[in-house]
Amino acid sequence: MFNLQDVISALTGHQISPLDVRLSGAVIDSRNAVKGSLFIALPGERVNGHDYVQSAFDNGALAALVDQDMARAFNTLDLRENKFDPDSVTLSLPICLRVDDTLTALQTFASDWREKHPVRTIGITGSVGKTSTKELTASLLSEKFNVLKNPGNRNNEIGLPLTLLELEPHHDVAVLEMGFYVPGEIRTLCEIARPQVGVVTNIGTVHAERAGTQETIARGKAELVESLPAAPDGTAILNMDDPWVKKMSAKTRAKVFTYAITEEADLTASAIETQGLEGLSCTLTFKGQDYAIQSPLLGEFSVYTILRAASVALVEGLDWETIQAGLAVSQVDLRMHPITLKNGAVILDDTYNASPASTIAALKLLKGLKGQRVAILGDMLELGAYEEMGHQSVGKYAATAADVLILVGNRSKTTADAALENGFPEEDLQWYPDSQQAAAPTAANIRNGDVVLIKGSNSMRMDKILAALEEKS
């Protein structure tokens, strides 16, 4: 782990030997501070981290990055340009490190720390499938390498630097999910992480409310492949079945490795067979050779996750025997996973987030399962101009995939209208304004033999319905 001297050196360019104090890690929440932590005080929309510096110190933090004058007196070392004097440094812990901007300081330190660790770095972006691809890729590469990955959804300008600060000498590979909200964000993440391999999943309409058009989203995602080093050092792994991603081959200096199901590509999948909640099988074809794959992943859409992970594995030198074995046994932390309730109902928990493409993919899985199929769907947010069209497309498909349809949120009224217009029985459709009001009546009606999909944007709190189902059963 890093020490206080590493922080000072990264932010000032000076080596100060009295500051050779080991730090146990970096945190942005004072509640997560432990003995030896570095606390980064970030000003937020609702909470200002500077108000919690004392709390972080009380929990054991030895240093805090701050960019505001503190209301109370702390031991402080000013690292700002023209204010830092390397010859007059005195060490008194705990200590505040004064910088111009704490987020910039975090990113600068993370970039410097990444530079000190010669790991292979894989960046993953796209509208749908980033997290599942990250998880499966990390699992597969772990068959041969020591792998660091960003946990959960720590994929933004704060979370990715915090992940890089967890790099240790034993790590060989870093697998990093890269999120996108506005143009320029992924370029910034690449400047910090310097990936040699970039994977693009697809281009959808999620975050269109912030980013604008699908074309703008595509340009933002393309920043990953544009930032890769030139061939042979860099490799862009691209989805040939997605027309937006396909165009990115002209935007990179890196070697291009392609994958697809329907189009020609370096790695293709065929003979796809889903086995309900038991997983799936398919055949991957590479350089004219076929390889049988068995995987516990759910749904036909998961074949793309398999293709991406296998593509990275091939680029990183894994042999096919290792790839096949790794795919067959990988227990990855995916968001949609089956939960069997005490009453015998099976829940497909996909409550974290939702877009039209990911919701229709989940409905396709539901459609192929046995039992009474119940789809509990919440609003899909941040779709911008695609909001009405996206909810209509989900409603149209849900009419063919579910026996019971429970919709939550004002936007899902559009989903309801589309389902009814496409022949869904009105008596089997229920609508609620929010998850709180939907929870109790929904839980009261789920029975043994039901298979239930729960999905919606994170802020819709669809997990409240899941909690009610688990408690009621």
Image (cartoon, helix red, strand yellow):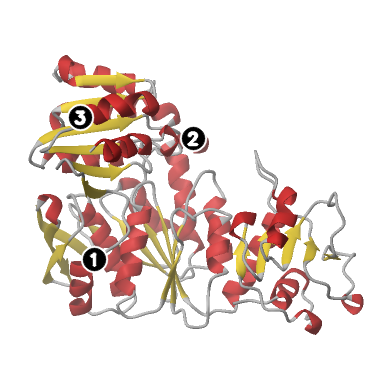
- Point out the tag, 1 or 2, that comes first from the N-terminus: 2
Q: Amino acid at mark 3?
A: Ala
- Point out the tag, 3 or 1, that comes first from the N-terminus: 1
The part of the image, by quadrant, that contains residue 19 is bottom right
Question: What is the x, y in percent for residue 206?
Answer: 41, 39
Disc 2 packing (10 Å; few <14; some 14–19; many ≥20): many
On the image, numbered disc 2 is attached to which residue? 212
Q: Amino acid at mark 1?
A: Asp
On the image, numbered disc 3 is attached to which residue? 398
Q: Is residue 143 above or below residue 358?
A: below
Please give the name of the residue rendered at 15% of the width and 20% of the height, measured from the top-left corner. 424
Q: What distance separates the C-alpha of mark 1 from that of mark 2?
A: 32 Å
Q: Nearer the viewer, residue 124 or 9?
A: 9
Q: What distance separates the C-alpha of mark 3 from that of mark 1?
A: 34 Å
Question: What is the x, y in percent for residue 458?
Answer: 42, 39
Q: Amino acid at mark 2?
A: Gly
Q: Is residue 15 above or below residue 230?
A: below
Under circle 3, the secondary element is helix
